[in-house]
Each structure stands twice: as C-alpha cells, then as structure tokens.
C-alpha cells in the first residue's frame, strides 16, 4: 500500500460565486492552495481528480426531489436561504464538490492512498435531507459515508465533525442509523442552535450520535481533552471501518464567525489523535473534507497543519 496522502481540488470550485462580503468565498480556497503549494508537504501529495457526483448518489441521503429543487434555484440565481447564495454554475460545482469527496473515499478504501483530504466548496454539513442552509447545498460527507456503504461494501462508518458550528444536517441524516457514528464538537451557543449533549441518536441508534458543545474561549487543550477522554473511547466501542472528518477550521482563534481559540497546532493534535486511533481499528483509513473556516490566515495555516499530519502519519 502506498504511503501517500491523496489531495482533491478543482479550480471550478472558485466559480461558486457567493457575492461580495460573503464569508464563504473563493479566496478561502485560493489562500489555502497557495499555502499548501508553499509548504514542504506539497510535493508529497497524490493529486486526485474530482468528478461530479451523480444525482442518484446525491439521493443516497437527500430526498429524491431535492437535487432538482437546488438546480432550479441555481438556474434562477435565487438565494436558497438568507445566507446561502448561488449562481447558475453552483449546482454543477456542488456536484463536483461532493464528487471530490467521493473520489478520495475511493482512493482510500481501495488502498491507492493511505488517507486523503478534499479541499472543496461549497461545504456540506448543514444540508439536511431536504433543506439547504448555512452555505451548504449537498451534504458531502454524509453522501460519502453512504457511498462507502453502498458502493464499497463498508459496514460501519464514523464521522468526526470539528467545524465550530454543529453539523446538524449530518446528524439529522444518520440520527436513527446505527451503522454511522456521528461526533460533533462545536461552540455553543452558536448557529444553528442544535447539537446539545442530550441529542444521542434515536431508536436502535441511540448512542451513535455524540455531541460535545463547547463554550466560547475553548482552545487547544480543552479540545484535545475531549478527543482523548470522550471521542476516542466512544470510537473504540463503535469500531468503525473508515473515519470521515468534517474538517471545518472556523474554531481557529482568528475566525470572524466564532469565539473559540484553537490554533493550527491544535488542529494538528486533533488530526494526530484521529490518525492514531484509525491505525488501531480502521486500517488507517481517514477521509477528510473541508467544511468551514473564514479567516484566510486561519483556514490556510490550519489546512497546512492538518494535511501535514496526514502526510506524516
């Protein structure tokens, strides 16, 4: 098995134009790509070409009429919500964003790479089965989880979401699914207002949703303690075959949309903890996809820190 880390990116991601002064802007990827290209790990990455997810694949987690609904809004260039703006190209770009995550999932589970990061936009973790919100059109990471199960025969998948905002869409999609473990650590109170610790999953899936709300001001040490004391024991109990990361970097201390105090080194530590666990029970299989992160300096240095750890694992 190769020891390389896969990396998916496509220049078309920059063409999802959210309008002036929107936090989820193309410059997030431009800055992160430039920082990666200037880093010592750039030459060690294995490029993976994104291809578009099919409508059928989008419907692995979304309702059958949902993609057409999104397409119609994009064609009309009508905002999906007050904070989720689109242009005509956004529908195809969102399918390419999801597809980038599916392609790295392919590469990881087939052994073409040891782990991988997809630097995509628009992000996905707020998108529910039938609703776009929070800058998200399709739930990239949720679709990837179901894709691994349906098209690669993977049984149990764990999703670790460290975006500073609760991944409400991902939680909703898998809330009653005992084959997918969903963990979210997020600032609370904060948008979208979900993710209380008592939200643990429904029916037979009780216990496969794990939320750790954090107060503003929480930093590297507090996050690492939660991973060590809460997340890792829960993952050991669940024994996933693959770990997916909703890698939002808006918990960075420079981020304008939140009040947590993580540093790039803090994200390195979280990455290390996941990689170490994955080696024990998931054959090292880690698939990571970009979610939020709205300070250009914060997101770019955090992406480099995260990818560097993937490369060195």
Image (cartoon, rainbow, N blue to C red):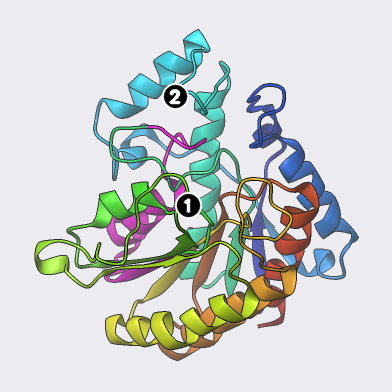
Q: Residue at x 38, y 48 (%)?
A: 193
The answer to whether residue 107 shows anywhere in this view is: yes
Viewport quadrant of the N terminus: bottom right
Viewport quadrant of the C terminus: bottom right
- Taking the view exactly as shown, the residue that stands out farthest to the top is 76
Q: Which span of residues is magenta-colored?
A: 132-160
Q: Residue at x 60, y 40 (%)?
A: 121
- Quadrant hosting residue 90: top right
Q: Earlier in the sequence, mark 1 or mark 2?
A: 2
- Residue 243 lies, in percent from the top left, at 44, 71
Question: From the viewer's perspective, is 103 left or right of 197?
Answer: right
Relative depth, front residue between 140 and 100? 140
- Residue 6 lies, in percent from the top left, at 64, 63
| Front tag of 1 and 2 | 2
Q: Which residue is mark 1?
A: 102
Q: Which residue is mark 2?
A: 81
Which element is circle 2 on?
loop
- Quadrant hosting residue 166: bottom left
């Amino acid at each position: 098995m190769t020891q390389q880390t896969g990396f998916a990116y496509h220049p078309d991601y920059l063409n999802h134009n959210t309008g002036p002064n929107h936090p989820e802007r193309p410059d997030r990827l431009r800055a992160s790509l430039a920082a990666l290209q200037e880093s010592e790990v750039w030459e060690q990455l294995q490029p993976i070409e994104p291809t578009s997810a099919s409508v059928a694949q989008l419907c692995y987690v979304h309702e059958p009429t949902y993609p057409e609904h999104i397409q119609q809004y994009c064609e009309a260039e009508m905002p999906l919500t007050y904070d989720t703006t689109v242009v005509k190209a956004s529908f195809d770009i969102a399918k390419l964003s999801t597809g980038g995550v599916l392609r790295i999932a392919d590469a990881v589970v087939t052994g073409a790479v040891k782990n991988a990061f997809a630097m995509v936009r628009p992000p996905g973790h707020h998108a529910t089965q039938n609703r776009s919100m929070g800058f998200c059109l399709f739930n990239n990471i949720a679709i990837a989880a179901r894709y691994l199960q349906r098209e690669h025969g993977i049984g149990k998948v764990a999703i670790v979401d460290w975006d500073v905002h609760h991944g409400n869409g991902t939680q909703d999609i898998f809330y009653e699914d005992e084959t997918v473990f969903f963990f979210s650590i997020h600032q609370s109170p904060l948008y979208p207002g979900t993710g209380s610790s008592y939200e643990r999953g429904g029916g037979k899936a009780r216990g496969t949703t794990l939320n750790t709300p954090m107060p503003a001001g929480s930093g590297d040490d507090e996050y690492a303690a939660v991973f060590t004391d809460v997340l890792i024991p829960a993952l050991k109990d669940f024994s996933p075959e693959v770990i997916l990361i909703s890698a939002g970097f808006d918990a960075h201390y420079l981020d304008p949309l939140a009040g947590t105090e993580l540093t790039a080194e803090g994200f390195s530590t979280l990455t290390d903890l996941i990689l170490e666990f994955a080696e024990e029970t998931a054959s090292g299989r880690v698939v990571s996809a970009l979610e939020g992160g709205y300070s250009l300096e914060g997101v770019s240095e955090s992406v480099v820190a995260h990818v560097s750890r993937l490369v060195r694992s």
